[in-house]
Each structure stands twice: as C-alpha cells, then as structure tokens.
Image (tube, helix red, strand yellow):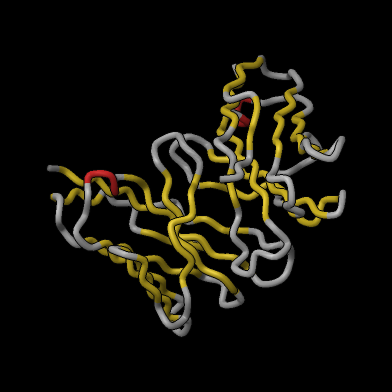
Amino acid sequence: RKEVEQDPGPFNVPEGATVAFNCTYSNSASQSFFWYRQDCRKEPKLLMSVYSSGNEDGRFTAQLNRASQYISLLIRDSKLSDSATYLCVVNIAGGYNKLIFGAGTRLAVHP
Amino acid sequence: EPEVTQTPSHQVTQMGQEVILRCVPISNHLYFYWYRQILGQKVEFLVSFYNNEISEKSEIFDDQFSVERPDGSNFTLKIRSTKLEDSAMYFCASRDRRSGANVLTFGAGSRLTVL
C-alpha cells in the first residue's frame, strides 16, 4: 500500500466550481499533515497545514480524520489561478521531520 | 520573504560524471533537506541534515550521494558518478527549529539531465 495515496485526476472544472480532493495515508504514526501546491516544473509550496479540528483559509478548507487516516481539501469558488497539482503530505513521527508526499492530484480550472 | 536559493537551475551532464548541486538555505534555519522529483512522479525524500551531520536518509541516498555544509551558508548535494536514472529535479529545503508545524521551505530546484 502506498504511504500517501491520492486520486491523480485530472479534475477539470469551470471557474466558480467547488472541488474536493481526498487523500489517505498508511502510517498511523503520521503526526503532521499538509496540503502543498505545485505548479508545473516548480517547487512545492505550502498551501495549508491540516489540523484535527479542521481548518479554513479563505476558499480552502482542510479536514483530517485520524481514525480513517483520511485527509481532504475543499476549494470553493475555483479560480483560473487555482490550476495546479495539489500534493497531500504527511510527516512521520520521530526522526527529523521527513515529509512523505503523495503523487498529487491535478486540477485544471477553465473559463 | 526569505527564500531558499539553488544553483544551477539546470545542469546537463554525461553519465559517470560528478555533479554538485548547491543550496543556500534561509539564514536562521537549522534543518536542511534534499528531495528529488523524477519527471511525472512524486516528490521523494533523499536526506535530512542537522547539526552538521546526516540525521536521516532514504534508500535512494546510496553511496553515490553525499551532502556537505562546507561553510555557514551553503548546503551541497554531490552525486559521484551520475546514472541516467538520476535525471530529476532536485529540491533543497530548510526548516526553522521553532517551526511548530514542521513547515519546510523549498528552493526552486535544480534540474539535472544525465545523458
């Protein structure tokens, strides 16, 4: 089983749509959770951390279910500029904060 | 905003040659990392470095790879004898000791093409 699993997409949505990404992780010792955004041939950039109680940042809402080992990201009112690959990332407890990346879900927002 | 800088942005080399990729982490950061991403694949952890020594490394980081912090600012990744499968984007990242959420800042990457 992959350590972090995501639907590869692509998700093709019109501007203004709401889109949800799902992610599962296999290591129950995972400690911290993140969504990163990666534009084509660029570095990953932190979009938001994910907290147990769920958290929101503008149009973006992240949820974590530790029991199911499941993470989600909801994007409301999609913009053209949201087009990118969204990476689900977990940090394994212990060690020096090695991040484990999912393969990413590609989002294409069209006019 | 402070950033991690990497050089070169793109390097083309012949198989068997040595390559050194350079990184300047954010100045007050204490933890340093190298990740790589083969085209079309996921970002993979290579190595973490703290207090002037390797703290953790992945299976990918074999004897062909080494890291060094030769002075107070640079953090380098050396590949001794490159193979075709080393072609990838290599990302350096750093982290502040105080980063409660373990947030890494990534550099823009160095693309390595091995011919």
Judging depth in this view, the residue of B78 and A79 nearest the camera is: A79
Where does the image place residue B62, in percent across and percent down from the top left? 76, 42
* Residue B83 x, y percent position in the rendering: 67, 26
Q: Residue furthest front?
A: B1
On the image, which quarter does residue B64 sit in?
Answer: top right
Name the spot of residue B55 as percent of width and height, x first: 80, 56
Q: If the image is split into quadrants, where does the C terminus of chain A sit?
A: top left
In the image, A32: left or right of A20? Answer: right
Residue B38 or residue A110, whichever sits in front: A110
Residue B60 visible in image: no
Give x and y (percent) for residue B69.
83, 39
Please state if A12 lies on the left or on the right of B68 as rendered: left
Q: Is residue A106 above or below residue A75?
A: above
Residue B2 seen anywhere in this rendered image of the structure: yes
Residue shown at 80%/38% (left/top)?
B66
Q: Quadrant of residue B114?
A: top right
Q: Is residue A90 above or below residue B28?
A: below
Q: Nearer the viewer, residue A39 or A90?
A: A39
The tally of labels here is 0
- Tell me what residue is drawn at x 57 percent, y 58 percent: A100
Residue situated in front as seen by the camera: B61 or B21: B21
- In the displayed structure, B24 sits above or below A50; it is above
**Residue pictured at 40% horizontal, 78% vertical:** A54
Residue at figure coordinates x 46%, y 70% from the top left: A50
